[in-house]
């Protein structure tokens, strides 16, 4: 991925991140106008306690800071997930990947609003971002993790082709503590050999406007 900058030198995530489309979803870079929807959906203890970086309570100021500080950097991308509807789109969650030192590769992370659980949205969104990362960037390995008390998140990773690689600890901001997690990884060559997410087509994508 290339680093896109404004005239002032500030990275512009929107100009670098394409729009991805799947059967039910549209994924694009988060915009400032998404702040209210992000804050409303993310302000949920059940979500925050299963993620590394979401605080709880999650305030509009947290969402604003999150969107404003997004930057397009090598091996990193953040997508807001929207459900397609009749003439409108409904914000449903986030999928991102990025490198967390000292990890050797980017780690994929995701959260979906509680009212959308159980509909396969996380799997569909994560598959789209995996396909983008491996087909459009030079990423060769993606990492993933799920709390040991979160079998639903583990199933998402497994359905996306990730293979269990061990156990570890992850710091959860909402808990102010480290918790045990199952660790996973997906290599580009494994993705290439099994990529059949129910359709042979890669997600459609276009440059963001």
Image (tube, grey):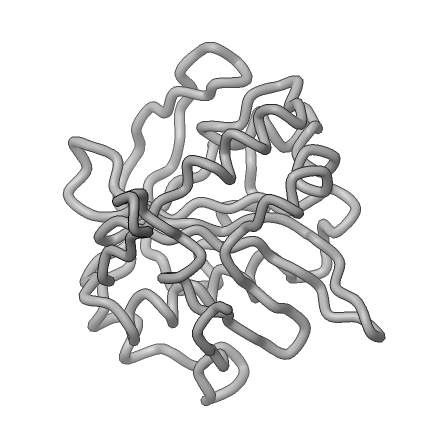
Q: Residue 91's spot in the image, x, y percent?
A: 70, 53
Q: Is residue 121 visible?
A: yes
Q: Is residue 194 left or right of residue 56?
A: left
- What residue lies at 29% left-to-right and 75% top-to-bottom? 135
Q: Quadrant of residue 101?
A: top left
Q: Residue 79's spot in the image, x, y percent?
A: 49, 55
- What residue lies at 46% left-to-right and 78% top-to-bottom? 206
The furthest residue to the top: 176
- What residue lies at 44% left-to-right and 51% top-to-bottom? 78
The furthest residue to the bottom: 200
Q: Residue 80's spot in the image, x, y percent?
A: 56, 53
Q: Quadrant of residue 4?
A: bottom left
- What residue lies at 74% left-to-right and 35% top-to-bottom? 40
Q: Residue 181's spot in the image, x, y percent?
A: 40, 31
Q: Is residue 118 left or right of residue 134?
A: right
* Total tally of numbered discs in the picture: 0
Q: Is residue 182 above or below residue 85?
A: above
Q: Is residue 163 above or below residue 55?
A: below
The furthest residue to the front: 7
Q: Is residue 58 left or right of residue 188?
A: right
Q: Is residue 51 left or right of residue 44?
A: left
Q: Is residue 164 visible?
A: no
Q: Nearer the viewer, residue 65 or 204?
A: 65
Q: Quadrant of residue 60?
A: top right
Q: Quadrant of the N terminus?
A: bottom left
């Amino acid at each position: 991925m290339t680093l896109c900058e404004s005239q002032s030198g500030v990275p512009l995530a929107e100009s670098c991140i394409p729009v991805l489309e799947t059967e039910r979803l549209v994924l694009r870079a988060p915009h400032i106008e998404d702040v209210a929807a992000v804050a409303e959906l993310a302000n949920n203890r059940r979500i925050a306690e299963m993620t590394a970086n979401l605080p709880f309570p999650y305030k509009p100021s947290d969402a604003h800071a999150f969107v404003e500080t997004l930057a397009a950097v090598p091996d990193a991308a953040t997508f807001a997930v929207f459900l397609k509807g009749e003439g409108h789109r409904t914000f449903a969650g986030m999928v991102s990947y990025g490198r967390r030192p000292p990890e050797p590769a980017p780690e994929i992370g995701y959260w979906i609003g509680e009212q959308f659980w159980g509909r396969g949205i996380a799997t569909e969104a994560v598959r789209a971002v995996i396909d983008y990362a491996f087909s459009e960037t030079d990423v060769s390995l993606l990492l993933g993790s799920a709390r040991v008390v979160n079998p639903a998140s583990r199933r998402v990773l497994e359905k996306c082709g990730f293979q269990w690689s061990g156990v570890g600890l992850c710091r959860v901001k909402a808990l102010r503590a480290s918790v045990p997690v199952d660790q996973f990884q997906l290599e580009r060559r494994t993705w290439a050999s099994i990529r059949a997410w129910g359709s042979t087509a890669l997600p459609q994508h276009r440059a963001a406007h």
